[in-house]
Image (spheres, grey):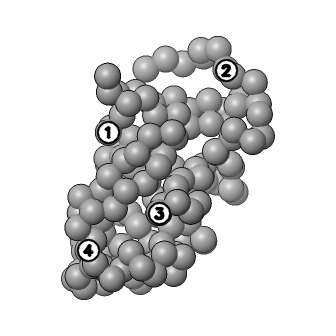
Amino acid sequence: MEIGGKSAPLEVRKSNLIFDDDHLAVTVGVQGRKGLAALDTGALSTDLYQALAAQFPSLMESGKKESTEVRAVGGAETYESVIIPELRFEVGGMETVLRPAHVLLNRASRSYIGNFGMDLLRQARAFKVDFAAMTLELEASK
């Protein structure tokens, strides 16, 4: 971990992070289109929300309906979900994969497609959050 490193200059066209009220959100790629997800480095796993199903209905076709238990600081809750065998995201310049991907159907959060956690970020050799440049970059393993 490095804190206080040299930041890149802010180039709005290259920025993929925004502050949305009390959330840090990242622009991600899904099937060649863009989506917005909360970035949560304190979350061990990624939760996908009904906005993903609404924005990308074709993704749900390969899924199976089940229920998924989500554990957090406040306890555990069970949600109706669709389990997709594999779902790919472009995050911070790198392709990441959730196997399987759990889309929580009765869990909404603004217009975010999900809350991206460390399971996606750990797929990179390293990741960098640059608040001056407002970018998230993932570095692929060599």
Look at the picture and state if 115 lies above or below 92.
below
In the rendered structure, which amino acid carries the disc numbered 1?
Gln
Left or right, 126 with respect to 78, comes to right
User: Taking the image as drawn, is residue 71 in sight?
Assistant: no
Viewer-side label of 3, 1: 3
**Crowding near the residue tagged with mark 4, few <14, some 14–19, many ≥20 C-alpha atoms within 10 Å:** many
- Sequence order check, earlier mark of 3 and 1: 3
Look at the picture and state if 140 lies above or below 37.
above
C-alpha span from label 1 to label 2: 23 Å
C-alpha span from label 4 to label 3: 17 Å
Contact between labelled residues 4 and 2, with CB atoms less than 8 Å apart:
no
> Which residue does the image show at 27% across and 79% down from the upper left?
63
In the rendered structure, which amino acid carries the disc numbered 2?
Ser
The residue that label 2 is drawn on is 7
Residue 142 lies, in percent from the top left, at: 32, 22
**Crowding near the residue tagged with mark 3, few <14, some 14–19, many ≥20 C-alpha atoms within 10 Å:** few
In the rendered view of the protein, which quadrant contains the N terminus? top left
Residue 101 lies, in percent from the top left, at: 30, 65
Viewer-side label of 4, 3: 3
Q: Quick one: SS at disc 3?
A: loop
Residue 83: assigned label: 4
Contact between labelled residues 1 and 3, with CB atoms less than 8 Å apart:
no
Q: Quick one: SS at disc 2?
A: loop
**Crowding near the residue tagged with mark 2, few <14, some 14–19, many ≥20 C-alpha atoms within 10 Å:** few
Residue 60 lies, in percent from the top left, at: 36, 80
Look at the picture and state if 113 lies above or below 105.
above
Residue 31: assigned label: 3
**Crowding near the residue tagged with mark 1, few <14, some 14–19, many ≥20 C-alpha atoms within 10 Å:** some
- Sequence order check, earlier mark of 1 and 2: 2
C-alpha span from label 3 to label 1: 19 Å
> Which residue does the image show at 54% across and 71% down from the upper left?
109
